[in-house]
Image (spheres, helix red, strand yellow):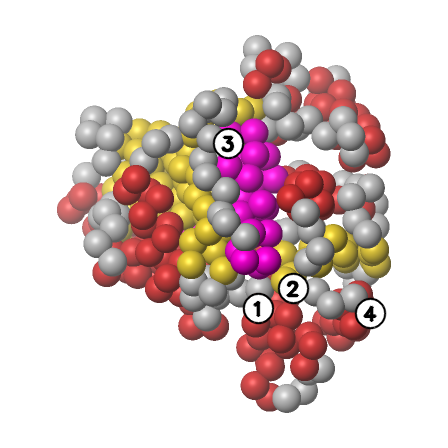
Amino acid sequence: MPRVLVLALENWLGAAHLPRALTRAGFEVSLLCYPNTLISLTRFADDRDICVPTDGAEIVARRILGLIESKPTKMCIPADDRALRFLQHIDQLAPTGQLPKPLSDLARASLPNPDAFVYGEDKESAGRLMESMGVRTPRRELIWSTGDLRDFIAEAGLPVVIKPLVGTAGQGVQVLRTDDEAKAAQIGSGRWMAQKYIAGKAAAAASVALHGKCLGTIAFEKTLTHPGETGSASVVTRLDNDEIRHAAATFAKATGFNGFYSPGYIIEEATGDAYFLEINARAVPLVPASAMLGLDLCRCLYAGIVGAPLPAQDPAAPTVLALYPQELHRDPNSPNRHLLLDEPSDDPLVHKAMQRGIELIEAGLA
């Protein structure tokens, strides 16, 4: 039975479901995480260790080594952006020979080619790559000031979207529809991008690859998001979109991708065309729940590692899924409770902690 290590260095809702989904898919699971986080409560880990936010990189690396040296591990799965950056740092240091070989080998087996790291960090670079492969992208331009923004609006017209080149879950994203909103726009430090606003629904492709081969993809619409239009998905609808699936496979091949990833899109309302926006270079919250939509992406990874036939999409599976607890964070009295198909009632401590969070939100205390 192949073993994977889940590395979690932040307290993300979706990450807490990963060990359970990987275990169900057939993996043995090791876990390294911070204490007092949702994922630390899971019962779905065969062995585990903890580190704390004040631990330096050397201590975290030593904890990883302790888990993988006694039990051979096929892949490390970063559960959040900080874990992803940590793995990338290991891989970048590997050529110096300063790191133990088992550690650098694990990082290499878990990541895309090193020159592809930029695509998960820089939306402009990701856009240029996808454009070069024939994928449709919105008109965009790097901006450094409000003056640059005014120039872009003068050429492209309103509405536009501005966003930092580095960021996830809608952080810093602003939709500017009027002159007053454009005048009030806040451009922070670092590199920013202005992009022509495409009226439509946000979408993505939850995907997994091994050695550059895409093993499985679920294209989905972000039917409901929280908080607001630019927030994370709380209800998703599976899409039958060959264009999005093909682009996910093309990206994996171009970057030699290993592990979970998710290209993000907007589906234009007027035409149905998909416009690529960005890459999430790690598992998104749909991944652990993907079996509920008819294609278990964790099982796809398992099949790729052991050389088994890849699972096929079940066309009879439900097409709409409410993510737990995200949909109840959006609305504790949500009318979509019947769509909560992957509530972790078999992971009791995680479930109890998530229920408590919902209760605090309902009471206005969180």
Residue 190 location, x and y as percent?
Answer: 45, 60
Tag 1 secondary structure: helix
Tell me the distance, in whole angstroms, between the alpha carbons under discs 4 and 3. Answer: 35 Å
**Residue 159 vertical placement versus 300 (above, below):** above
Callout 2 crowding tier (Cα within 10 Å): few <14, some 14–19, many ≥20: some
- Give, as a three-letter code, the residue at label 3: Gly
- State the residue at coordinates (61%, 70%): 107
Front disc: 2 or 1? 2
Of mark 4 and mark 1, the one earlier in the sequence is 4
Of mark 2 and mark 1, the one earlier in the sequence is 2
* Left or right: where 26 falls relative to 316: right
Tell me the distance, in whole angstroms, between the alpha carbons under discs 2 and 1. Answer: 7 Å
Magenta segment boundaries in residue numbering: 279-307
- Give, as a three-letter code, the residue at label 4: Ser
Residue at which label 2 appears: 74
Tell me the distance, in whole angstroms, between the alpha carbons under discs 2 and 4. Answer: 13 Å
Identify the disc placed on residue 109: 1
Of mark 3 and mark 2, the one earlier in the sequence is 2
Of all residues, the one furthest to the left in this rendering is 155
The residue lying toward the viewer, choosing from 59 and 114, is 114
Callout 3 crowding tier (Cα within 10 Å): few <14, some 14–19, many ≥20: some
Residue 241 location, x and y as percent?
Answer: 32, 35
